Image (tube, grey):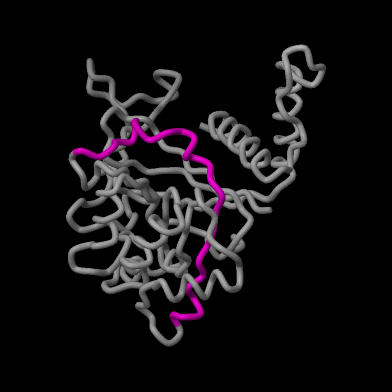
């Protein structure tokens, strides 16, 4: 997983750096001394040197059988894997290894929701393109608004005010909503699961995808919004988009300038899975 994530970081970053003009190399004719595999490798090496000197922030909660989860799913089960022939658990002393069998719903801990989670005709996890696993990251810090409205829904007006300070949300970005709910993940799980909670408004979600062209969104809560019919989540999944729920540490990421990497396993026809997300700071 670590090696695969590194490859996605490098490849996606080269594309992003090239787009913003940070890489001066451009492919030339076949006879050019600056083209070919050697030049491409040099560009990748330069991109990796840039990235390796940056700060990385984990946006993922560790999960366990005690992790907060929607009551309709129930907790995970972590148990020793057993030899099917004997029914006995594998141990280092007896077998030279030990391992764990995990039983959990796909929407557990920090996880990715593909369109097929709600839409029977939508893309499943194995159909989401790996190019979308690394994206420019914008963070909407809603915490100042929560002092007067603890269950505030991030609105289009809030978004436009954010753009007045930070510039237009770039097309192709991942938009994350900071509410600091993640701080209750371990210290107060019942409060973390509260209803209602600070979240996206349906109008802001639709505006971001239709008017700003974001690729995906994420948030710290277990749901996209607090509407009774999950209007925001239903809209985005039925329109072919994906999201990351139960994010962590967004308070350590600037509102603009970072990259996000989100990686997940590739179950065939997968409807959701715990993900590993992290930010690379500018």
- Judge whether 196 appears above or below 112 on screen: below
**126 horizontally vs 10: left or right:** left
- Judge whether 150 appears above or below 182 on screen: below
Report the residue at 44% width, 56% height from top.
247
Asked if the stretch drawn in magenta spans residue 138, the answer is yes
Q: How far from the left and from the top, in percent, is residue 146?
A: 44, 80
Q: Nearer the viewer, residue 181 or 282?
A: 282
- Judge whether 176 appears above or below 280 on screen: below
Q: Which residues are magenta?
A: 121-146
Q: How far from the left and from the top, in percent, is residue 35?
A: 75, 19
**251 horizontally vs 115: left or right:** right
Asked if the stretch drawn in magenta spans residue 94, the answer is no
Q: How far from the left and from the top, in percent, is residue 231?
A: 24, 62
Q: How far from the left and from the top, in percent, is residue 124?
A: 29, 36
Report the residue at 48% width, 40% height from top.
133
Q: Residue furthest bottom?
A: 148
Report the residue at 34% width, 55% height from top.
67
Quarter of the figure with residue 246? bottom left
Report the residue at 20% width, 38% height from top.
121
Quarter of the figure with residue 177? bottom left
């Amino acid at each position: 997983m670590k090696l695969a994530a590194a490859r996605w970081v490098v490849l996606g970053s080269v594309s992003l750096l090239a787009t913003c003009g940070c890489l001066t190399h451009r492919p030339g004719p076949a006879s050019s001394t600056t083209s070919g595999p050697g030049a491409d490798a040099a560009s990748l090496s330069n991109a990796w040197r840039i990235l390796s000197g940056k700060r990385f922030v984990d946006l993922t909660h560790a999960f366990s059988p005690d992790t907060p989860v929607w009551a309709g799913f129930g907790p995970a089960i972590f148990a020793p894997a057993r030899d099917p022939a004997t029914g006995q658990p594998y141990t280092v002393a007896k077998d030279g290894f030990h391992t764990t069998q995990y039983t959990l719903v796909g929407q557990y801990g920090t996880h990715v929701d593909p369109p097929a989670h709600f839409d029977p005709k939508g893309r499943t996890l194995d159909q989401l393109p790996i190019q979308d696993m690394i994206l420019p990251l914008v963070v909407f810090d809603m915490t100042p608004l929560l002092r007067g409205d603890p269950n505030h829904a991030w609105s289009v007006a809030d978004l436009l005010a954010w753009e007045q300070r930070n510039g237009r949300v770039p097309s192709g970005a991942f938009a994350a909503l900071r509410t600091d709910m993640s701080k209750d993940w371990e210290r107060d799980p019942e409060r973390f699961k509260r209803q209602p909670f600070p979240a996206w408004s349906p109008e802001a979600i639709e505006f971001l995808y239709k008017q700003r062209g974001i690729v995906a969104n994420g948030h710290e809560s277990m749901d996209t919004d607090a509407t009774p019919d999950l209007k925001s989540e239903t809209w985005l999944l039925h329109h072919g988009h994906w999201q990351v729920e139960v994010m962590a540490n967004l308070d350590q990421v600037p509102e603009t300038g970072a990259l996000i990497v989100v990686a997940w396993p590739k179950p065939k026809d997968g409807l959701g899975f715990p993900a590993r997300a992290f930010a690379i700071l500018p």
